[in-house]
Image: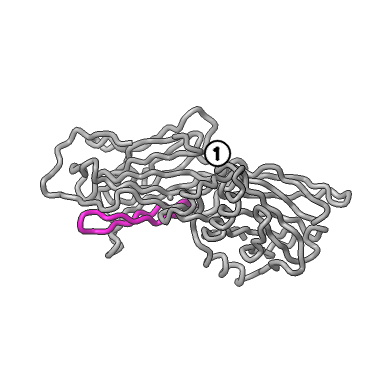
Amino acid sequence: MKFLLSIILIFSLISSPLLTFFVFSKSVYGDGLFMEQLSASLGDRKADLLIKMTPPIVTTDTISELGEKPTVQFRLTDSNTNQTLKAVTYFITIEKDDKQILADWFFNPDGNLIIQMQPRNQSHVSVAGDLDPILNAYTSRPESPVVASGPIFLEGGLYHFIIRIVTVDYSRTIIPDDQQPVFDGWLSIGASKDKTLNVDGKELPVKVLSYYDEIGNITYDKAPNSINFTMPFNYDPKRISDPKNTVFIHQEVHVPKPTELSAAGGYKGYANGEDVTNVLMVDGNNKTTDVVHYMMTKPIVQQITDDYLKNKSNAANGMMTFSLVPSKNGSMAMGGSAMNDTMMMMPHGAK
């Protein structure tokens, strides 16, 4: 069972005097695994932007092996009424590792925009769909979705979505540039890596998935009987402590059973050598594999960051190390409804 659960083009149009916006919070930040709900002030209203990926769990394996084509929904609503705002024009930029992979205009008369992502090995992302004749923006309709195809979601890790709202209520009335709210959200694609470890002369296959960044250097250490792996991480304290940023790191380790690595029945977990066993969750529903989840929320990540930066030789851009050790005193496997209920209670967010 896997865990379910943040560029402006100037229009040459004349703004209507009937519509005036006062955006008290221009930029809104958030971080997400498969879904974000971000807020901003819009005139005398407060607006929420939902960014939601379907299916909720997408990995490099499901894309390469199953040809998965996930959709991303953008829905702008009135915070007080939860009513979808109409005639919304979005300028959407998508970045991966600070590199822009898409930047284009989108419009939906009902405000509920859906883009289907078609990951392909090609040089750039191309967008196809109906064009609004005046806005020249791609428009999604239930019977005719917008499609973005190209090198998107091919790599695991975080994808940065920057959404600027250009029109609301009236499609021909442009919000002044300095009043257009900007939402920053993040969606995660699981990066899968397999490794065969030599444990007491036996070859044991393990899999590690990260919903944060690429996994590297999976090893086995005989003395503590531990599975170890690394992941790039930005330890910039301003980024971590920013109250507008939610931080959540989710990793999965798939351990075959019954084997020497699963014989204890439970596991202890470490991040940068610090005990994080209390945030481990072990899914024991699979008869042949224990799926161990690291669920590291912002306070834990902030403490690890503070300890890391105490060593003045450590750079902000570094690596985070993880270790998983079989232990009868560690987190034990859960199954059935208990596991499902606990998973649904976990927070959404990753950055």
SS label for mark 1: loop
Is 348 part of what is drawn in magenta? no
Tell me if I can see residue 62 in this picture.
no
Is 41 part of what is drawn in magenta? yes
Tell me if I can see residue 42 in this picture.
yes
Q: Which residue is mark 1?
A: 154
Picture coordinates of residue 235, whole percent (x, y): 54, 47
Magenta highlight range: 36-55
Q: Estimate how packed mark 1 is, as few (under 14), some (14 to 19) or many (20 or more) residues with alpha carbons within 10 Å.
A: some
Q: Is residue 20 left or right of residue 51?
A: left
Q: Residue furthest top?
A: 123
Magenta residues: mostly which secondary structure? strand
The answer to whether 95 is drawn above or below residue 280 in the figure is above
Residue drawn 24% across and 46% down?
179
The answer to whether 283 is drawn above or below residue 9 in the figure is below
Picture coordinates of residue 269, whole percent (x, y): 68, 59
Residue drawn 83% across and 52% down?
222
Quarter of the image with the N terminus in it? bottom right
Picture coordinates of residue 311, whole percent (x, y): 62, 48
Colour pattern: one colour
> Disc 1 residue type?
Leu
Of residues 328 and 63, the one nearer the viewer is 328
Q: Is residue 3 left or right of residue 184?
A: right
